Image: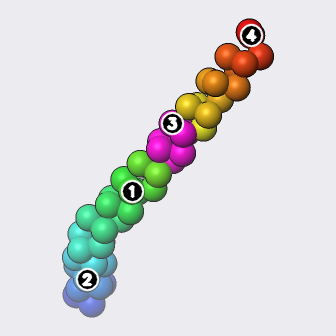
Amino acid sequence: MYGLFCSFVIVVVGISDTLPICIETINISLRCLIFKNHLRSKSKIPFEREKTT
C-alpha cells in the first residue's frame, strides 16, 4: 500500500513537472496551425477576387 502511494506521488510530481512543457508545446502547435490557416486564407482571397472580376 505504501509503495503504491509512493509511485502515485512520483507519477503526480512527474506529470506536474512535464505539464507546463506539454501546455507550451500545445500552444506553439496551435499558433502554428492558426498562422498556417491565416496564410492560406490570405492566399485564397486574391485568387477568389481574380475569379469574380
Q: Earlier in the sequence, mark 2 or mark 1?
A: 2
User: How far apart, in angstroms, are the residues tagged by discs 4 and 2?
Assistant: 62 Å
Q: Secondary structure at mark 3?
A: helix
Whether pointer 4 and pointer 2 mark residues with C-beta atoms closer than 8 Å, the reply is: no
Q: Which residue is mark 3?
A: 38
Query: What range is drawn magenta here?
Result: 33-39
Whether pointer 3 and pointer 4 mark residues with C-beta atoms closer than 8 Å, the reply is: no
Q: Which residue is mark 4?
A: 52
Q: From what the image shows, is residue 2 above or below residue 28?
A: below
Which-is-in-front pick, marks 2 and 3?
Answer: 3
- Horizontally, is 20 left or right of 43 in the view? left
Q: Secondary structure at mark 4?
A: helix
Whether pointer 4 and pointer 1 mark residues with C-beta atoms closer than 8 Å, the reply is: no
Circle on res. 28:
1
Between residues 14 and 20, which one lies in front from this camera angle? Answer: 20
Which-is-in-front pick, marks 2 and 1?
Answer: 1
User: How far apart, in angstroms, are the residues tagged by discs 2 and 3?
Assistant: 42 Å
Q: Earlier in the sequence, mark 4 or mark 2?
A: 2
In the image, what residue occupies the spot 39% across and 56% down? 28
Q: Which residue is mark 2?
A: 10
